[in-house]
Image (tube, rainbow, N blue to C red):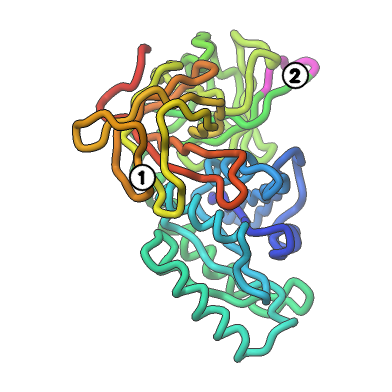
Protein backbone atom coordinates (compact mmCIF):
# COMPACT_ATOMS: atom_id res chain seq x y z
CA UNK A 1 0.00 0.00 0.00
CA UNK A 2 1.52 3.27 -1.09
CA UNK A 3 0.19 6.76 -1.69
CA UNK A 4 1.75 8.86 -4.45
CA UNK A 5 1.52 12.55 -5.26
CA UNK A 6 2.02 13.37 -8.94
CA UNK A 7 3.01 17.02 -9.05
CA UNK A 8 4.36 19.69 -11.40
CA UNK A 9 3.08 22.62 -13.44
CA UNK A 10 -0.17 22.66 -15.43
CA UNK A 11 1.60 21.61 -18.64
CA UNK A 12 3.85 19.02 -16.99
CA UNK A 13 1.81 16.00 -18.10
CA UNK A 14 1.05 15.04 -14.49
CA UNK A 15 -2.70 14.47 -15.04
CA UNK A 16 -2.14 12.25 -18.08
CA UNK A 17 0.38 10.20 -16.11
CA UNK A 18 -1.97 9.86 -13.13
CA UNK A 19 -4.75 8.64 -15.44
CA UNK A 20 -2.44 5.93 -16.85
CA UNK A 21 -1.45 4.72 -13.38
CA UNK A 22 -4.91 4.41 -11.82
CA UNK A 23 -8.67 4.67 -12.09
CA UNK A 24 -10.13 8.10 -11.47
CA UNK A 25 -12.07 8.56 -8.23
CA UNK A 26 -12.96 11.57 -6.07
CA UNK A 27 -12.34 14.96 -7.66
CA UNK A 28 -12.27 18.26 -5.75
CA UNK A 29 -9.24 20.55 -5.67
CA UNK A 30 -7.32 17.26 -5.77
CA UNK A 31 -8.09 14.34 -8.05
CA UNK A 32 -7.61 10.82 -6.75
CA UNK A 33 -6.82 7.67 -8.71
CA UNK A 34 -6.71 4.09 -7.44
CA UNK A 35 -4.88 1.02 -8.67
CA UNK A 36 -5.14 -2.50 -7.23
CA UNK A 37 -3.49 -5.61 -8.62
CA UNK A 38 -2.77 -8.54 -6.36
CA UNK A 39 -0.93 -7.24 -3.32
CA UNK A 40 -0.06 -3.95 -4.98
CA UNK A 41 -2.38 -1.10 -3.92
CA UNK A 42 -1.69 2.44 -5.09
CA UNK A 43 -3.48 5.68 -4.25
CA UNK A 44 -2.44 8.42 -6.67
CA UNK A 45 -3.19 12.10 -5.99
CA UNK A 46 -3.04 14.88 -8.58
CA UNK A 47 -3.29 18.38 -7.02
CA UNK A 48 -5.54 19.53 -9.87
CA UNK A 49 -6.15 22.97 -8.32
CA UNK A 50 -2.41 23.76 -8.36
CA UNK A 51 -0.64 26.05 -9.29
CA UNK A 52 -3.60 28.47 -9.09
CA UNK A 53 -3.57 27.82 -5.34
CA UNK A 54 -0.79 26.24 -3.23
CA UNK A 55 -3.32 24.48 -0.98
CA UNK A 56 -3.97 21.48 -3.31
CA UNK A 57 -0.21 20.89 -3.56
CA UNK A 58 0.21 20.97 0.23
CA UNK A 59 -2.82 18.69 0.62
CA UNK A 60 -1.43 16.15 -1.84
CA UNK A 61 2.03 16.17 -0.27
CA UNK A 62 0.54 15.69 3.21
CA UNK A 63 -1.41 12.61 2.08
CA UNK A 64 1.39 10.57 0.54
CA UNK A 65 4.58 8.56 1.06
CA UNK A 66 6.12 9.18 -2.34
CA UNK A 67 6.30 11.92 -4.98
CA UNK A 68 6.53 11.83 -8.76
CA UNK A 69 7.72 15.27 -9.89
CA UNK A 70 6.85 15.71 -13.57
CA UNK A 71 9.19 17.71 -15.81
CA UNK A 72 8.05 18.36 -19.43
CA UNK A 73 10.44 18.53 -22.43
CA UNK A 74 10.89 22.30 -22.08
CA UNK A 75 12.36 21.77 -18.60
CA UNK A 76 11.52 23.06 -15.15
CA UNK A 77 9.19 26.06 -14.92
CA UNK A 78 8.31 28.29 -11.92
CA UNK A 79 5.68 25.82 -10.66
CA UNK A 80 8.15 22.92 -10.74
CA UNK A 81 10.63 25.06 -8.83
CA UNK A 82 7.99 25.86 -6.22
CA UNK A 83 7.21 22.13 -5.96
CA UNK A 84 10.89 21.40 -5.25
CA UNK A 85 10.93 24.03 -2.48
CA UNK A 86 7.82 22.48 -0.91
CA UNK A 87 9.35 18.99 -1.08
CA UNK A 88 12.54 20.26 0.50
CA UNK A 89 10.78 22.18 3.31
CA UNK A 90 8.70 19.09 4.14
CA UNK A 91 11.79 16.86 4.07
CA UNK A 92 10.24 14.38 1.62
CA UNK A 93 12.90 11.82 0.71
CA UNK A 94 11.12 9.23 -1.43
CA UNK A 95 10.41 10.20 -5.00
CA UNK A 96 11.16 9.99 -8.70
CA UNK A 97 11.77 12.76 -11.24
CA UNK A 98 9.69 11.92 -14.30
CA UNK A 99 10.53 13.40 -17.68
CA UNK A 100 7.12 13.34 -19.32
CA UNK A 101 6.24 13.38 -23.04
CA UNK A 102 9.46 11.56 -23.88
CA UNK A 103 8.10 10.87 -27.38
CA UNK A 104 8.42 14.61 -28.07
CA UNK A 105 12.18 14.63 -27.29
CA UNK A 106 15.27 12.82 -28.46
CA UNK A 107 17.80 11.04 -26.21
CA UNK A 108 20.24 13.96 -26.38
CA UNK A 109 17.61 16.51 -25.26
CA UNK A 110 16.41 14.20 -22.47
CA UNK A 111 19.95 13.82 -21.15
CA UNK A 112 20.62 17.56 -21.31
CA UNK A 113 17.36 18.24 -19.51
CA UNK A 114 18.20 15.63 -16.87
CA UNK A 115 21.62 17.19 -16.27
CA UNK A 116 20.05 20.64 -15.86
CA UNK A 117 17.40 19.34 -13.46
CA UNK A 118 20.00 17.45 -11.41
CA UNK A 119 22.07 20.61 -11.02
CA UNK A 120 19.02 22.60 -9.91
CA UNK A 121 18.15 20.01 -7.25
CA UNK A 122 21.57 20.12 -5.62
CA UNK A 123 21.28 20.57 -1.82
CA UNK A 124 17.59 19.58 -1.75
CA UNK A 125 16.00 16.34 -0.50
CA UNK A 126 15.29 15.43 -4.16
CA UNK A 127 18.98 15.54 -5.17
CA UNK A 128 19.39 11.76 -5.37
CA UNK A 129 16.03 10.84 -6.88
CA UNK A 130 16.10 8.69 -10.01
CA UNK A 131 15.28 10.48 -13.26
CA UNK A 132 13.09 8.49 -15.65
CA UNK A 133 11.70 9.35 -19.09
CA UNK A 134 8.15 8.22 -19.96
CA UNK A 135 5.48 8.74 -22.59
CA UNK A 136 1.79 8.19 -21.93
CA UNK A 137 1.24 8.08 -25.73
CA UNK A 138 3.78 5.42 -26.69
CA UNK A 139 4.07 3.96 -23.15
CA UNK A 140 7.84 4.32 -23.36
CA UNK A 141 9.32 3.90 -19.88
CA UNK A 142 5.98 3.19 -18.18
CA UNK A 143 6.87 -0.35 -17.10
CA UNK A 144 10.24 0.81 -15.79
CA UNK A 145 8.47 3.56 -13.82
CA UNK A 146 6.07 1.05 -12.27
CA UNK A 147 9.01 -1.14 -11.25
CA UNK A 148 10.71 1.85 -9.63
CA UNK A 149 7.48 2.63 -7.75
CA UNK A 150 7.38 -0.98 -6.54
CA UNK A 151 10.95 -0.73 -5.25
CA UNK A 152 10.14 2.40 -3.25
CA UNK A 153 6.88 0.79 -2.09
CA UNK A 154 8.88 -1.96 -0.35
CA UNK A 155 10.95 0.60 1.58
CA UNK A 156 7.87 2.61 2.54
CA UNK A 157 5.96 -0.49 3.66
CA UNK A 158 8.85 -1.39 5.98
CA UNK A 159 8.70 2.12 7.45
CA UNK A 160 4.97 1.76 8.11
CA UNK A 161 5.48 -1.61 9.79
CA UNK A 162 7.90 0.01 12.22
CA UNK A 163 5.03 2.13 13.61
CA UNK A 164 2.61 -0.77 14.11
CA UNK A 165 2.82 -0.69 17.90
CA UNK A 166 2.54 3.10 18.22
CA UNK A 167 -0.74 4.87 19.10
CA UNK A 168 -2.92 5.03 16.00
CA UNK A 169 -3.57 8.21 14.03
CA UNK A 170 -5.91 8.78 11.08
CA UNK A 171 -5.95 12.00 9.06
CA UNK A 172 -9.32 12.64 7.38
CA UNK A 173 -9.71 14.07 3.88
CA UNK A 174 -13.42 13.55 3.12
CA UNK A 175 -16.62 13.16 5.19
CA UNK A 176 -20.25 12.46 4.28
CA UNK A 177 -23.45 10.71 5.38
CA UNK A 178 -24.44 7.30 4.02
CA UNK A 179 -28.07 6.26 4.34
CA UNK A 180 -28.42 3.35 6.76
CA UNK A 181 -24.84 3.72 7.99
CA UNK A 182 -24.51 7.30 9.18
CA UNK A 183 -21.31 9.31 9.39
CA UNK A 184 -18.53 8.08 7.12
CA UNK A 185 -15.06 9.54 6.67
CA UNK A 186 -12.26 8.77 4.24
CA UNK A 187 -8.67 9.13 5.32
CA UNK A 188 -5.30 7.58 5.85
CA UNK A 189 -3.77 5.73 8.77
CA UNK A 190 -0.45 7.50 9.27
CA UNK A 191 0.69 5.65 12.37
CA UNK A 192 -0.17 2.51 14.33
CA UNK A 193 -3.12 0.21 13.59
CA UNK A 194 -6.83 0.97 13.92
CA UNK A 195 -9.42 -1.65 14.86
CA UNK A 196 -13.16 -1.99 14.55
CA UNK A 197 -14.82 -0.76 17.79
CA UNK A 198 -11.78 1.31 18.81
CA UNK A 199 -12.77 4.20 21.03
CA UNK A 200 -10.81 7.40 20.45
CA UNK A 201 -11.31 11.11 19.80
CA UNK A 202 -11.48 13.43 16.84
CA UNK A 203 -9.48 16.66 16.97
CA UNK A 204 -9.59 19.65 17.12
CA UNK A 205 -13.31 19.36 17.92
CA UNK A 206 -12.37 17.03 20.82
CA UNK A 207 -15.29 14.65 20.41
CA UNK A 208 -15.18 11.06 21.66
CA UNK A 209 -16.18 8.48 19.08
CA UNK A 210 -16.20 4.80 18.18
CA UNK A 211 -15.10 3.24 14.90
CA UNK A 212 -18.15 1.20 13.90
CA UNK A 213 -16.67 -0.36 10.77
CA UNK A 214 -13.62 -0.19 8.49
CA UNK A 215 -13.32 -0.60 4.74
CA UNK A 216 -10.18 -0.74 2.63
CA UNK A 217 -10.81 -0.38 -1.11
CA UNK A 218 -14.52 -1.23 -0.58
CA UNK A 219 -13.73 -4.43 1.36
CA UNK A 220 -14.82 -4.77 5.00
CA UNK A 221 -12.01 -5.45 7.44
CA UNK A 222 -11.56 -5.53 11.21
CA UNK A 223 -8.29 -3.58 11.27
CA UNK A 224 -6.08 -1.37 9.13
CA UNK A 225 -2.33 -0.75 9.56
CA UNK A 226 -0.26 2.37 9.01
CA UNK A 227 -0.20 3.39 5.35
CA UNK A 228 -3.74 2.17 4.67
CA UNK A 229 -6.35 4.30 2.94
CA UNK A 230 -9.60 3.66 4.79
CA UNK A 231 -13.29 4.40 4.93
CA UNK A 232 -14.58 4.54 8.50
CA UNK A 233 -18.16 4.53 9.79
CA UNK A 234 -18.16 6.55 13.01
CA UNK A 235 -20.42 6.65 16.05
CA UNK A 236 -20.49 9.80 18.18
CA UNK A 237 -19.98 12.49 15.55
CA UNK A 238 -21.97 13.82 12.59
CA UNK A 239 -20.40 14.06 9.16
CA UNK A 240 -21.22 17.78 8.92
CA UNK A 241 -19.03 18.39 11.99
CA UNK A 242 -15.97 16.81 10.37
CA UNK A 243 -13.65 18.75 8.06
CA UNK A 244 -10.67 17.85 5.92
CA UNK A 245 -7.65 17.67 8.20
CA UNK A 246 -9.46 16.54 11.33
CA UNK A 247 -7.49 13.84 13.11
CA UNK A 248 -8.68 10.66 14.82
CA UNK A 249 -6.29 9.69 17.60
CA UNK A 250 -6.05 9.26 21.35
CA UNK A 251 -4.45 12.66 21.86
CA UNK A 252 -3.34 15.73 19.91
CA UNK A 253 -2.16 19.21 20.80
CA UNK A 254 -4.95 21.68 19.96
CA UNK A 255 -4.17 25.40 19.94
CA UNK A 256 -4.49 28.73 18.15
CA UNK A 257 -1.30 30.05 19.77
CA UNK A 258 1.83 28.26 18.58
CA UNK A 259 5.60 28.57 18.86
CA UNK A 260 7.74 26.93 16.17
CA UNK A 261 11.41 26.35 15.52
CA UNK A 262 11.62 27.43 11.88
CA UNK A 263 14.01 27.12 8.98
CA UNK A 264 13.44 30.02 6.59
CA UNK A 265 13.78 28.99 2.94
CA UNK A 266 16.87 30.43 1.27
CA UNK A 267 14.64 31.18 -1.74
CA UNK A 268 12.24 33.35 0.28
CA UNK A 269 12.20 37.06 1.25
CA UNK A 270 12.29 36.06 4.93
CA UNK A 271 9.81 36.35 7.81
CA UNK A 272 8.75 39.62 9.44
CA UNK A 273 6.93 40.38 12.70
CA UNK A 274 3.40 41.61 12.04
CA UNK A 275 3.05 39.88 8.69
CA UNK A 276 -0.07 37.88 7.86
CA UNK A 277 0.66 34.55 6.17
CA UNK A 278 -1.01 31.20 5.63
CA UNK A 279 0.02 28.06 7.49
CA UNK A 280 -0.38 24.40 6.55
CA UNK A 281 -0.03 21.42 8.90
CA UNK A 282 -1.13 17.90 7.88
CA UNK A 283 -4.32 18.65 5.86
CA UNK A 284 -5.27 21.73 7.88
CA UNK A 285 -4.67 25.34 6.90
CA UNK A 286 -5.32 28.71 8.48
CA UNK A 287 -4.40 32.37 8.11
CA UNK A 288 -1.79 33.28 10.73
CA UNK A 289 -0.10 36.36 12.13
CA UNK A 290 3.57 36.47 13.09
CA UNK A 291 3.73 38.13 16.54
CA UNK A 292 7.35 37.46 17.46
CA UNK A 293 10.67 36.22 16.06
CA UNK A 294 13.78 35.19 17.98
CA UNK A 295 17.12 34.58 16.26
CA UNK A 296 20.08 33.40 18.36
CA UNK A 297 18.26 34.24 21.59
CA UNK A 298 17.48 37.83 20.54
CA UNK A 299 14.09 39.21 19.51
CA UNK A 300 14.28 40.63 16.00
CA UNK A 301 11.83 42.30 13.60
CA UNK A 302 12.75 39.96 10.76
CA UNK A 303 14.37 36.59 10.04
CA UNK A 304 16.32 36.62 6.81
CA UNK A 305 16.33 33.90 4.14
CA UNK A 306 18.29 30.89 5.38
CA UNK A 307 17.90 31.82 9.09
CA UNK A 308 16.93 29.42 11.83
CA UNK A 309 14.57 31.10 14.29
CA UNK A 310 11.83 30.67 16.85
CA UNK A 311 8.53 32.12 15.67
CA UNK A 312 5.42 32.94 17.69
CA UNK A 313 2.24 32.52 15.66
CA UNK A 314 -1.46 33.27 16.24
CA UNK A 315 -3.84 31.25 14.05
CA UNK A 316 -7.31 32.27 12.96
CA UNK A 317 -8.73 28.96 14.17
CA UNK A 318 -7.65 26.18 16.49
CA UNK A 319 -5.55 23.48 14.84
CA UNK A 320 -4.66 19.93 15.89
CA UNK A 321 -1.10 18.61 15.64
CA UNK A 322 1.67 16.67 17.36
CA UNK A 323 5.43 16.92 17.84
CA UNK A 324 6.20 15.04 14.61
CA UNK A 325 4.22 17.35 12.31
CA UNK A 326 5.84 19.87 9.99
CA UNK A 327 4.28 23.32 9.64
CA UNK A 328 4.67 25.29 6.39
CA UNK A 329 4.34 29.07 6.28
CA UNK A 330 3.23 30.52 2.96
CA UNK A 331 2.70 33.97 1.44
CA UNK A 332 -0.28 33.60 -0.88
CA UNK A 333 0.36 37.01 -2.42
CA UNK A 334 3.94 36.36 -3.47
CA UNK A 335 4.40 36.83 -7.23
CA UNK A 336 7.24 34.29 -7.32
CA UNK A 337 7.34 31.30 -4.98
CA UNK A 338 4.90 31.15 -2.08
CA UNK A 339 6.56 28.87 0.50
CA UNK A 340 8.50 30.82 3.14
CA UNK A 341 9.50 28.51 6.00
CA UNK A 342 9.09 25.12 7.64
CA UNK A 343 8.73 24.66 11.38
CA UNK A 344 8.35 22.11 14.15
CA UNK A 345 7.29 22.35 17.77
CA UNK A 346 10.30 23.34 19.91
CA UNK A 347 9.63 20.73 22.61
CA UNK A 348 6.94 18.29 23.63
CA UNK A 349 4.14 20.78 23.17
CA UNK A 350 3.19 23.95 21.41
CA UNK A 351 -0.05 24.89 23.09
CA UNK A 352 -2.75 23.66 25.42
CA UNK A 353 -4.31 20.23 25.10
Q: Residues within 10 Å of mark 1 (few under 14, many from 20)?
A: some
- The part of the chain drawn in magenta is 179-184
Q: Mark 2: few, some, or many residues within 10 Å (few <14, many ≥20)?
A: some
Residue 342 shown left or right of residue 246 in the figure: left
Quadrant where the C terminus sits is top left
Alpha carbons under labels 1 and 2: distance apart: 47 Å
Residue 255 location in percent, x, y? 43, 16
What's the residue at 59%, 33% (across, down)? 187
Mark 2: secondary structure? strand
Q: Which residue is mark 1?
A: 304
- Magenta span has 180? yes
| Secondary structure of the residue carrying numbered label 1 | loop
Q: What residue occupies the far left of the structure in this picture? A: 297
Expressed as whole percent of the image width and height from the top left, the position of residue 345 reads 32, 30
In the rendered image, residue 313 lying in the magenta stretch gets the answer no
Asked whether 315 or 140 is in front, the reply is: 315
**Residue bearing the label numbered 2:** 177
Q: Position of residue 264 (x, y in %)?
A: 38, 45
Left or right, 311 with respect to 210, comes to left
Number of numbered discs overlaid on the protein picture = 2
Residue 309 sits in which quadrant?
top left
Amino acid sequence: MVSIAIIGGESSGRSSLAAKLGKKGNETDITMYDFTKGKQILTIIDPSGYPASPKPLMTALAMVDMVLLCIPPKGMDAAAGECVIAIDLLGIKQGILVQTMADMSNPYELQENANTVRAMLKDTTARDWDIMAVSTNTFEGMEELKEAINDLDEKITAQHLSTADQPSRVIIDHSFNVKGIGSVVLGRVTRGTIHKHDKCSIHPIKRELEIRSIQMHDIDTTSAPSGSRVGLALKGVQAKEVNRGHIISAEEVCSDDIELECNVSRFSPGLAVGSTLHMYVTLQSSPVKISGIVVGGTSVPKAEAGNQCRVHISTEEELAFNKDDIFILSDLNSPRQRFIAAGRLPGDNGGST
